[in-house]
Image: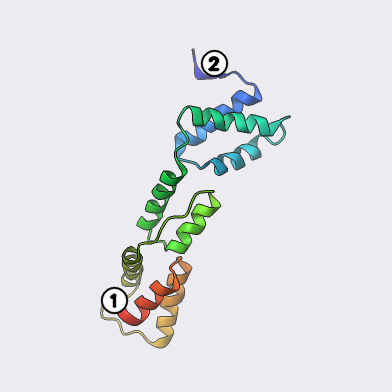
Amino acid sequence: MSEEKKLGSSPRNLAKRKVMDLLSRRDHSEQELRIKLRDKFSEVEDSDNVIDEAIEFAKDSKWLGDPQELSYRMADMLHRRNKGIIYINNYLREKGLPAVETDRALELEKALTIVKNKYDENYEFSREEQARVGRLLASRGFDSETVRKVLYEKL
């Protein structure tokens, strides 16, 4: 029997199917699922109960992971994209996930990688260019301590 015939086409079953579809593509936090389901099922009578039931279905099926673990996985993905800790924690907060701790050495390494990719190794930085580098790093979500270390100790 196909999954569609088992679940039927009631709003509750459609919501469960939507949760399965979303979670099959990538991990979502509970808050993300609620927002997406609310957009999809806002017209349905008793939509809050339908959404709650669909999320409970995902939890019972063990498809919805631990928020702390999901937070670390998303943070790791953003670290690989050379994003700063401020950016990472803002991103996690938007997704309804707990913040992660910062690793100063990793932050410094990522910031230096960004600068090295943009400028030659023996490049002489003027004051204006140092300010430009500082703004670049701040826009990538690096904290002021990391930016200061890069500008005044590493360049």
Q: Residues within 10 Å of mark 2 (few under 14, many from 20)?
A: few
Q: Amino acid at mark 2?
A: Lys
Residue 59 or residue 128, whichever sits in front: 59
Tag shown at residue 120: 1
> Which residue is located at x 55 percent, y 15 percent?
5
Q: Residues within 10 Å of mark 1 (few under 14, many from 20)?
A: few
Residue 2, above or below 110: above
Left or right: where 53 falls relative to 90: right
Q: Amino acid at mark 1?
A: Asp
Q: Secondary structure at mark 2?
A: helix
> Which residue is located at x 47 percent, y 63 percent?
86
| Quadrant of residue 146 within the rendered picture | bottom left
Question: What x and y, as percent, mark residue 121?
Answer: 26, 76
Q: Secondary structure at mark 1?
A: loop
Q: Nearer the viewer, mark 2 or mark 1?
A: 2
> Which residue is located at x 45 percent, y 66 percent?
140
Residue 35, above or below 48: below
Q: How is the image coloured?
A: rainbow
| Quadrant of residue 126 within the rendered picture | bottom left
Tag shown at residue 6: 2
